[in-house]
Image: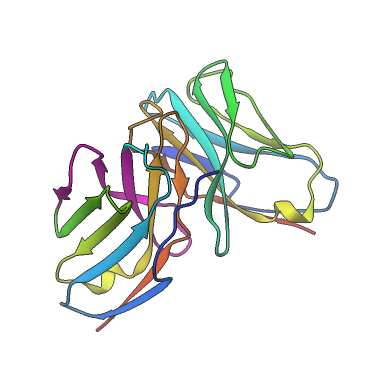
């Protein structure tokens, strides 16, 4: 099966700083990637996605970078706020209808 | 804006009991899926469906059955619950399978004693 891993299980940042969450994926044929945010007791919430024909995509305060050479994905959150505290998951979609999720990184924002 | 609705939110079963976890979506999405989330293991795909009448297995299908008789509903059945099925279950839907954002429900927390 697929394995999607994250480099750090936990991350603490000061409010206002930028956060970077990393993800390694295993299938070089994966052509679609999604970042999700999960708050305690809730379901995963879509943040941003990127397709394999792109290297970077920006949203509101978030940027996803894709490095296909080393099979690495990162999520950058600008000016991190207390409301950003959550677990962040990356997911990869190889050819076909299945998605594979990483184990998650817990982000804590320190006021 | 209901989105994806899962019921119940919490359930406690005894080993060997059966139950059905309900999932309904009101977005007319063709693709629906079930995941389980265990500590330290992320979300793992149990079963998915690309449309009414069509289902397929994911990573961890053993012990679970699904059916898709309508576009809106995708129930997950545990025929004989086991302690290993203690987990949080999430249902998701999307307009298509590959290459589409999946939208998740709030989850069902299941404990099997």
Locate residue B57: give its quadrant. Answer: top right
Q: Is residue A70 visible?
A: yes
Lateral position of residue A100 relative to residue A12, left or right: right
> As rendered, which of A83 and B41 lies closer to the eye?
B41
Report the residue at 58% width, 36% height from top.
B58
Query: Is A46 located above or below residue A93 in the figure?
Result: below
Position of the N terminus of chain A, as image quadrant, is top right
Report the residue at 66% width, 37% height from top.
B61
Query: Is A20 located above or below residue A17 in the figure?
Result: above
Query: Is B86 located above or below residue B60 in the figure?
Result: below
> As rendered, which of A27 and B67 lies closer to the eye?
A27
Q: Position of residue B104 (x, y in %)?
A: 43, 44
Q: Position of residue A44 (x, y in %)?
A: 41, 52
Report the residue at 20% width, 64% height from top.
A77
Q: Which residues are magenta?
A: A32-59
Provide the major secondary structure of the magenta segment.
strand
Lateral position of residue B113 relative to residue A69, left or right: right
């Amino acid at each position: 099966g697929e394995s999607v891993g994250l480099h750090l299980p936990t991350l603490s940042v000061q409010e206002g700083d930028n956060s970077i969450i990393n993800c390694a994926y295993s299938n070089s044929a994966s052509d679609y990637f999604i970042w999700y945010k999960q708050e305690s007791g809730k379901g995963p919430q879509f943040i941003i996605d990127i397709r394999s024909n792109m290297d970077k995509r920006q949203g509101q305060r978030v940027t996803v970078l894709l490095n296909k050479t080393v099979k690495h994905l990162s999520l950058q959150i600008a000016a991190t706020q207390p409301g950003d505290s959550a677990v962040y998951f990356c997911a990869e979609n190889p050819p076909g209808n299945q998605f594979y999720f990483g184990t998650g990184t817990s982000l804590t924002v320190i006021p | 804006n209901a989105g994806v609705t899962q019921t119940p939110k919490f359930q406690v079963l005894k080993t060997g009991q059966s139950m059905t976890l309900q999932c309904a979506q009101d977005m007319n999405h063709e693709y629906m899926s079930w995941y389980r989330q265990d500590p330290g293991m992320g979300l793992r795909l149990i079963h998915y469906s690309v449309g009414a009448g069509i289902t397929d297995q994911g990573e961890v299908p053993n012990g679970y059955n699904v059916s898709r008789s309508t576009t809106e509903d995708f129930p997950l059945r545990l025929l004989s619950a086991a302690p290993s099925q203690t987990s949080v279950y999430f249902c998701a839907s999307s307009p298509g399978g590959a290459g589409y954002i999946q939208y998740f429900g709030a989850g069902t927390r299941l404990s099997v004693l």
